[in-house]
Image (cartoon, helix red, strand yellow):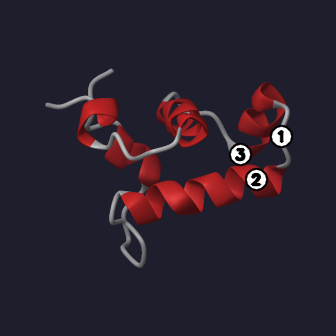
Amino acid sequence: MHSIKSTHNYLTGKEFEVANLIKEGKTTNEISELLNIAKSSVDTHRFHIRKKLGLNNKDINLRSYLDTFSE
């Protein structure tokens, strides 16, 4: 099992932060409040994370996928 940071080091700092919160089970609304950013920004980060992880157009739950990585 690899860490998400070492395996996908091309995620930006904010994308990595959002990915970790998704992995913890936080919702878009919760992430938005925690990071003090708009919900649409969280959605954009989610889109970019899925794209960079090769999950676009695939029926794979992002949180489940992120759970396969260690801290």
Q: Marks 1/3: CA distance? A: 10 Å
Q: Look at 77% across and 30% down and name the residue there.
A: 35
Q: Earlier in the sequence, mark 1 or mark 3?
A: 3
Discs 1/3, front: 1
Identify which amino acid the numbered label 1 is placed on: Ile
Instruction: Find numbered disc 3 in the image and state the secondary structure of the residue it sits on.
Output: helix
Judge whether 57 appears above or below 11 on screen. Answer: below
Tag 3 residue = 28
Q: Look at 71% across and 45% down and name the residue there.
A: 28
Label 2: few (<14), some (14–19) or many (≥20) C-alpha neighbours in 10 Å: few
Discs 2/3, front: 2
Judge whether 4 appears above or below 54 on screen. Answer: above
Most foreground residue, 44 or 33? 44
Q: Look at 33% across and 20% down and name the residue there.
A: 71
- Where does the image place residue 27, in percent across and percent down from the top left? 67, 41
Identify which amino acid the numbered label 3 is placed on: Thr
Residue 10: mark in rendering = none
Label 1: few (<14), some (14–19) or many (≥20) C-alpha neighbours in 10 Å: few
Identify which amino acid the numbered label 2 is placed on: Ser
Q: Marks 2/3: CA distance? A: 9 Å
Judge whether 67 appears above or below 57 on screen. Answer: above
Tag 1 residue = 37
